Amino acid sequence: MANTRTSKGIFAQVIDFFASVKLAIVILIALATTSVIGTVLPQGEPLEMVVRRYGPATARLIGLFQLQDMYHSWWFQWLLLLLSANLIVCSLRRFSSTWKVIQAPPRSVSDGLFETLPFQKKMRLSTNLDASRERVQALLGKKFKALKTLEAPSGLAFYAEKGRYSRLGVFLVHFSILVIFAGAIAGSLWGFKGFMELQEGEAKDKITIKNSGELRPLGFAVRCDRFLVSFYENGMPKEYRSDLSILEGGREIQKASIRVNDPFTYQGITFYQSTWDRVPSTVNLSLTQGEQVRQVTVAQGQVTEISGTPYSLSLERFVNNLSDFGPALGLVLLKDRQEVDHSWVLADHPGFHGNRLADFRIKVEKMNTRYVTGMQVNQDPGIWFIWVGSCLMLLGFIVAFYFSHQQVWVWIREKTDPKGKTRVELDLGGTAHKNRAGFILSLERLVNRWGSD
Amino acid sequence: MNSSFILSIVTFGYLFAALAYLLLLVFRKDAFGRLATWITLIVLGLQTWAIIWRWIESYQLGIGHAPFSNLYESLIFFAWTIAFIYLWIEFKTGLKTIGAFTLPFAFLSMAYASFSPDMNTRIQPLLPALKSNWLIAHVITCFLGYAAFAVSCGLAFMYLLRGKKPEKAKSVAGPTSFLPEQTVLDDLVYQTVMVGFLLLTVGIATGSIWAHSAWGTYWSWDPKETWSLITWLVYATLLHARMMKGWHGKRIAWFSIIGFACVLFTYFGVNFILSGLHSYGSA
């Protein structure tokens, strides 16, 4: 028997530990202080980068505690798990006793009751019992909705209360945090974050998942019909917009436009305007060799023969802004499929000395560009948990902060003093489960008003 | 004349208001109190007008947007929220001496906006990511929350200065004995933290709705977000210590000051020391 008692004791101790406010405070402080690390150390960098930046010894320490990605590290997740356990155990333990209080009928009046109440006042009344009762009702009726008549050993007794269910506010707050956690977990288990780049006119049915780089089929295809970028007069970007078409089995199902701050959702998958780029579809070049000028049109990824010569040109790369010199083409000159020369050719600086391949001077006559839109493509089945949890939390805060369960007892008795004279005596007492000082103050004001009229 | 000119008057207005409250504290003449309240009311009205005017000016420039888009505009709004919340408390409690400890924050915020040499005071168009009504809700709630925390911090300083001098010694003691009683201050520190905590929570929630519509993630652990969470956790700890462990007085006062230090780091430190999505301070 002794053995089971100790094991029960250990179990109770474990429960006590998880339910304690002390643990809650320790976890909150631990979360706050450790979170600082991730705002100082760069997050999401590969370990090789960390080694280069901090040296191997420090990097080993950083790697051990996953500080380069600390918000997803094992120990941070454990802290969050511990917080959840603390919330659940503490709430379950308190809930039954709170529920009992909520369900309980008001305590009956006695001299002992008034002694335990944080606010108590004894008054002598000049009016008789019935008139006194009317005055009590008139006075308390302003603050409390209904006065309930209690059974009393003698005289008359009333009870009034409000905000009984406000005792549940704190549970709502704690529950809302769990709802938000559930949303975050659901999002990371069954959702994905991906990326998709589309040239104007191009269609794709797969996205690239972030971090892993894995390709994931969407179950439908997306085509970018048009990308638009507009600027303010001072050159700041004003709007990015992609006009998209959803295709299923090659058939166009739906059209949609996305902007920054204005995403589009299809079959639970949301497309966000994220980045953009511009690539040349074709470029018209003029090649000067001595006195002879030739016109050539090149396209990215294609090899174009330069007529009348044994050479051909390949447009290997394009960048929108090369070292602040504007758009540049990475051109390769070939002869018999062998590279002869290569160079960056600056489109906006025709006089640049590097615009030359072997003995050809190269000038960009016209660039026919095509936009590329970069879209973040996400699915997050937990998102509504986050929004519902946030709303519940706010509701919970308002209830927990600004409402309290206020109770008032009144007992009116006729008493006979030693001289044999009968007078009416009133006991008034009250309590509130929160902000007692404020409640006592408001009752004092109420009683003072009584005295004055 | 434009809105910037009025805003520079407002800067000095808050300085004078704070000085008038200080005079009330030193000389204990009600006239100073009345003067201080009137100055604050007029300056707040003037500032409200200037903010609305700046809003109109942005529409006249053809780039209309609410004036909550860069560091300059946020500092001005911060000062506005501090004065607003302070006046609200003054009308609720009638305790005017609090002004001497809270309006200096409003003045400092305005002074920083007006006199910092590398402050960009021009009205600029909004980047596509900032075009969202959630952004307006986010900024308003965050700064009202920050202001409540600023007022709470001022009250905490008052509490610590007040000491436990008995009321009777009023006539011989220094100006600190003219301050409200410690129990009153203690309660106000706590009440303002609750207001701030509620608003900060709304601010974080609206911010995450905005982030979700702009970038597709409601939480990305960028330094600003993380520091707002750290601030939230510090005040959550304060509330648990107060409600469940009965902490009060000095401990809560210091807690409130530490909390406000976190607010300041979230607001300024992250912009100037750390980097992230919110780093408008470097512009």
Image (cartoon, coloured by chain):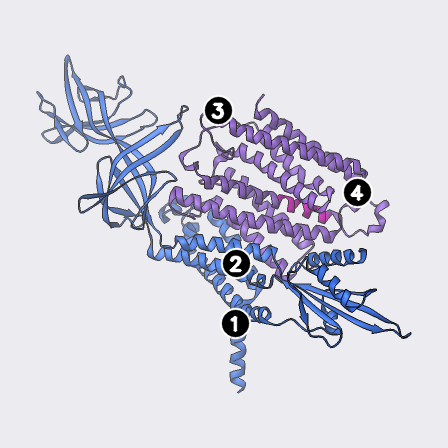
> On the same chain: label 3 and label 2?
no
**2 or 1: tag closer to the N-terminus:** 1
* Chain letter for mark 3: B
Indicate which label's residue lies in the foreground, 4 or 2. 2
In the depicted structure, whether residue B243 falls above or below residue B20: below
Q: Which chain is blue?
A: A
Position of residue A315 in the picture relative to residue B44 (left or right): left
Assess whether mark 2 and mark 4 are in contact (beta carbons under 8 angstroms): no
Instruction: Residue type at mark 2: give it.
Output: Val
Position of residue A313 in the picture relative to residue A13 (left or right): left
Instruction: Please tell me whether residue B242 belongs to the stretch shown in magenta.
Output: no
> On the same chain: label 3 and label 4?
yes
Instruction: Residue type at mark 4: give it.
Output: Pro
Q: Which mark is residue B60?
A: 3
Q: Is residue A66 shown to the viewer in this render?
A: no
Measured in 3D between alpha carbons, the distance from the residue under mark 3 to the one under mark 2, in whole angstroms, is 45 Å
Q: Residue furthest right?
A: A419
The residue singled out by tag 4 in the image is B175
Measured in 3D between alpha carbons, the distance from the residue under mark 4 to the one under mark 1, in whole angstroms, is 52 Å
Measured in 3D between alpha carbons, the distance from the residue under mark 1 to the one under mark 3, in whole angstroms, is 66 Å
The residue singled out by tag 2 in the image is A173
Q: Nearer the viewer, residue A211 or A243?
A: A243
Tell me which residue sits at (62%, 60%) in the image: A404
Give SS at disc 1.
helix
* Picture colour for chain B: purple
Q: Nearer the viewer, residue A394 or A315?
A: A394
